[in-house]
């Protein structure tokens, strides 16, 4: 019997079992994968691992439904997505509970994700008719010829999404694909399937045609390649290493792909910055969702003249961040997704300290709060010999690097194999 005390008040075992029934995989004779709540380490459900037959069947269903869906105008499709937007807002309290339960998110982070997904739907509903209409283009010989640009759906789009933002990346990214007239097959991360399943239940309630949106569950390394082999376009969010494999496989089939990959993102803090404004915002950019965010800042380059003041005030601010578990707004920091991920974050910190880095704040797990909580952590004196310097940590850890000037900071920030995100903090927008 499931311990119901681990569940939030609006999401219980009955809802999760109902969501599991929407998975487009036959559970019989399939390996069942446990889903674990990071706050407590308890198993809250099981999902089946899709096989090749499941993938082929799901894509075929989406393709059949897409034949009629593509004939609707963007405005007609937009009416369905508007209804989804309204349903998501109407049930936002319940929706916010789910990423907390399965992903260990602080409630403020979960709330932001749910409302961001609703805003994404509203934005694309309003802009799709303009973006998708026929556009006339300039030609070399006006009067003798004309050119028009048309937009047609590609068919069925596959989505391989990560655990850190299961609403935004699991369903939010699919909204423009649906508005453009495509069918979609969603493969959420096996650690956080219920957010995607909940959103899909709202899409179906909103009037998305039967079969147009399919959900497959299972491990990415098994189901992902099967999905890429069958869809007409693939979207992937995840690590740089896996992204290369996705691009290679899509390239062999000559299908399009969109990839959002890892980052070792940098902030540059110039001497003229208003620290009262900058420090809370930089902290948020580092520790949002416990740093489990591809655009989270992991490196801060600070002009030497303000390093002592910046470091002192930043560490003081970080020390005031609240670390707690619960389905309310009492915590500023999310849990890490698994104990294995916590071990990796701790390894990065311990490796740096063992090689001479100075630990200014945090640096330890918080088992008193929950099995996967880690303190917000600040280090300095980090150098090239340390994992923390170049490898994405994906946790609540940041390094502060003194820099002589803005040019040196830009050079250091760009000395990375990653791309993705970057910011400059200054009172002079011309310098930023």
Image: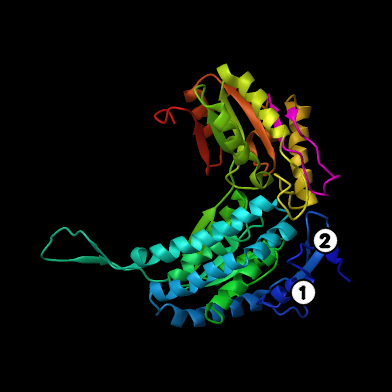
For residue 225: magenta?
no
Q: Is residue 128 left or right of residue 82?
A: left
Residue 426 location, x and y as percent? 48, 28
In which image quadrant can residue 46 be found?
A: bottom right
Looking at the magenta stretch, what is its main secondary structure?
loop
Residue 213 visible? The answer is: no
Q: Where, quadrant-wise, is the C terminus in this rendering?
A: top left
Q: Disc 1 and disc 2: Cα gap in Å?
A: 14 Å
Nearest to the observer: residue 224 or residue 335: 335
Q: Camera-side residue: 419 or 166?
A: 166
Vertical side of 421 occupied by 379: above or below: above
**Is residue 287 left or right of 121 when viewed as pictured?**
right
Q: From this viewpoint, which residue is outermost toward the right?
A: 1
First reached walking from the N terminus: tag 1 or tag 2: 2
Colour mode of the rendering: rainbow
Q: Residue at x 61, y 21 (%)?
A: 307
Spot occupied by residue 72 in the image (x, y as percentages of width and height): 40, 79
Instruction: Please give the range of residues in magenta.
Output: 360-381
Depth check: give the residue in front, 304 or 251. Answer: 304
All told, the count of numbered labels is 2
Residue bearing the label numbered 2: 6
Helix or strand or loop: what does disc 1 sit on?
helix
Q: Residues within 10 Å of mark 2 (few under 14, many from 20)?
A: some
Q: Tell me the SS state at disc 2.
A: helix
Farthest residue in the left direction? 143
Residue that carries the numbered disc 1 in the rendered image: 14
């Amino acid at each position: 019997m499931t311990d119901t005390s681990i569940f939030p008040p609006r999401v219980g075992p009955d809802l999760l079992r109902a969501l599991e029934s929407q998975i487009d995989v036959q559970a019989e004779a399939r390996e069942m994968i446990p889903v674990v709540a990071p706050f407590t380490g308890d198993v809250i459900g099981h999902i089946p691992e899709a096989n090749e037959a499941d993938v082929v069947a799901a894509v075929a269903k989406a393709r059949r439904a897409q034949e009629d869906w593509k004939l609707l105008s963007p405005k007609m499709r937009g009416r369905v997505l508007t209804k989804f937007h309204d349903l998501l807002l109407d049930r936002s309290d319940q929706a916010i509970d789910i990423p907390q339960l399965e992903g260990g998110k602080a409630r403020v982070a979960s709330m932001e994700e749910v409302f961001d997904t609703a805003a994404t739907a509203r934005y694309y509903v309003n802009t799709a008719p303009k973006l998708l209409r026929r556009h006339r283009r300039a030609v070399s010989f006006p009067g003798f010829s004309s050119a028009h640009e048309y937009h047609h759906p590609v068919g069925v789009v596959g989505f391989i999404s990560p655990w850190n933002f299961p609403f935004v990346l699991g369903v939010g990214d699919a909204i423009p694909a649906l508005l453009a007239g495509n069918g979609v097959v969603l493969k959420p991360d096996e650690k956080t399937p219920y957010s995607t399943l909940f959103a899909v239940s709202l899409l179906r309630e909103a009037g998305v045609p039967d079969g147009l949106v399919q959900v497959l569950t299972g491990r990415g390394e098994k189901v992902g390649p099967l999905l890429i082999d069958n869809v007409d376009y693939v979207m992937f969010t995840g690590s740089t290493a896996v992204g290369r494999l996705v691009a290679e496989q899509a390239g062999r089939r000559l299908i399009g792909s969109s990839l959002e990959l890892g980052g070792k993102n940098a902030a540059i803090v110039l001497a003229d910055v208003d620290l009262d404004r900058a420090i809370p915002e930089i902290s948020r950019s580092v520790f949002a969702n416990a740093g489990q965010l591809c655009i989270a800042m992991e490196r801060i380059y600070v002009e030497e003249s303000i390093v002592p003041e910046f470091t002192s005030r930043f560490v003081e601010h970080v020390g005031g961040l609240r670390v707690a578990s619960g389905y309310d707004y009492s915590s500023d920091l999310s849990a890490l997704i698994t104990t294995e991920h916590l071990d990796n974050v701790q390894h990065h910190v311990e490796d740096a300290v063992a090689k001479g880095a100075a630990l200014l704040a945090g640096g330890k797990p918080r088992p008193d709060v929950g099995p996967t909580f880690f303190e917000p952590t600040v280090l300095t004196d980090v150098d090239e010999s340390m994992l923390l310097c170049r490898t994405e940590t994906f946790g609540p850890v940041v390094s502060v690097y003194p820099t002589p000037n803005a040019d040196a900071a830009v050079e250091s920030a760009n000395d990375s194999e990653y791309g993705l995100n970057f910011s400059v903090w200054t009172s002079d927008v011309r310098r930023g």
